[in-house]
Image (cartoon, grey):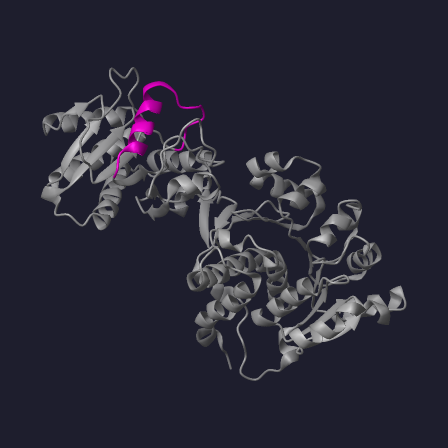
Amino acid sequence: MNILVDSWQMKQCDKNTIEHFGVPSLVLMERAALGTAEEIEKYVKRPPAESRALLVCGVGNNGGDGLAIARLLWQHGWDVTVVMPPEPRKVSAETKVQMGILEKYQIPIADTIPEKRFDVIIDALFGIGLTREITGIYQEYILKMNEIPGFKVAVDIPSGIHGDRGAVMGVGFRADLTVTFAFAKTGLLLFPGAEYAGRVVVKDIGIDRHSFLEKIPDMYYLSEEDLFKIPSRKIRSNKGSYGRVLVAAGQKNMSGAAFFSAKAAYLTGAGLVKILTAEENRVILQQLLPEAVLETYDALDTADKLADSVKWASAIAIGPGLGREAVLLVKIVLKYAQVPVILDADGLNIVSEHLEWLKEAKATVIVTPHLGEMARLVKKEIKLIQEQLIETARAFAEEYHVICVLKDARTVTALPDGNVWINTSGNNGMATAGSGDVLTGILAGLAAQGMEPELAAPVGVYLHGLAGDKAAKKKGIYGLMAQDILEGIPCILKGIGKEGNKK
């Protein structure tokens, strides 16, 4: 599990490292430059003597990083061109030192970008502290850098990208690679910033968890090592060992939603899955997924009988393709369930008119809205929610004491205690019918096996994205379908299976 920071938290880390631990700022700057130069030289295949780099530097410490990178590349034999704004009024103390070092090495600093070939274009204009729109000569520099052919590298964050929200501040540098320091920043993971950042590499420069002075941030992102947190399989076990999932889904002619959720629960490792659906879906679901137990609405004569079905489960997934008429079903599940409930699709649409049910629920509820569903839940415009993904998910989780999985190109998972995960797996091919139903089944499958919902939610979202990435490699993004994502799940889990088995 990787720590994610916003601009203020990163500045505090810098300050604490320098003032509390006594690490000189110039030492951190040199280490940042060394790490960046190292990454640049991995990507350039030409010999250093034949390589050309353009470094466009600002007047703050981000610019100082760029000046140090220029010197290091020059010392390795590169032909470097350094550009800074003419007659800067305010230059940071560390950047002044770096300017003096370049002067002594007789590395010139120009104020215009020349018309020549460059192998690498390095942006060191602005760091994570940018809060205003870029104009004037800085805008001209960024537009020019974007036009020049070559491999584009951003130092810490692409200039023009808001360090917290990922918003474009008028104009933004489009990087192929961003080398950031100590911890990833939220603006690099959220869109549109993620698109401008390209591939993100986090380099160690001597700032670690100690620099938070025990005030650890509450934002994270996952890596593949976190998949090993999924409950292991025991050699001596049976289907009862891995939980029972109730999937309440699929009104008449919507059997696909029930199928995707139920099969995803099975593929994630659940021992037994029961589908609660419309009678009209019986035949097709028995053909598509004979492993599932089937119970239909017609067989449920009373609310008491429905409550018994709810009590049977270790985890409940409700909502996909259910229809907005299933108000009683959603109400009973939220009223009686004492096991994790994953509330999706029409379940959310129903609850949007009965939000008090969430506050009254005894069970842990995971809500999985896409932007449109979230708009109905919080009565806000989609555009505003999209600009404030973290704030929206966190506020809803805290107010209704639920786990909120707010789905977007970067899905945000927020817990009632304020902890947040930003998901980095997945691709745009997954923007297809049934993809969300698969996620619902994955979350239910993990929760049924005993994984704490607070962990099952971000891990399930990450697993879902990895399965989509695996499918995209095989099928491409245009032809990707929900069934392909299903096929990707066991391919991902296969990698943890052998180490996860226990006697």
Looking at the picture, tell me which residue is in the foreground, 112 or 41: 112
Q: Is residue 256 above or below residue 405?
A: below
Check residue 148 for magenta coloring. yes
Horizontal relation, residue 189 to residue 100: left or right? right
Q: Please provide percent x and percent y for residue 292.
A: 68, 75
Asked which quadrant contains residue 260, the reply is bottom right
Q: Residue furthest right?
A: 302
Asked which quadrant contains residue 339, the reply is bottom right
Image mark count = 0
Q: Is residue 139 above or below residue 492?
A: above
Asked which quadrant contains residue 250, the reply is bottom right
The residue stretch that appears in magenta: 128-149
Horizontal relation, residue 381 to residue 355: left or right? left
Q: Please provide percent x and percent y for residue 336.
A: 80, 61
Q: Please provide percent x and percent y for residue 252.
A: 77, 63
Check residue 335 for magenta coloring. no
> Could you tell me if residue 367 is visible in this image?
yes
Horizontal relation, residue 56 to residue 241: left or right? left
> Could you tell me if residue 449 is visible in this image?
no
Looking at the picture, tell me which residue is in the foreground, 422 or 182: 422
Q: Is residue 155 above or below residue 338?
A: above
Q: Residue furthest bottom?
A: 236
Q: Please provide percent x and percent y for residue 499.
A: 44, 74
> Residue at horizontal 53%, vertical 73%?
232
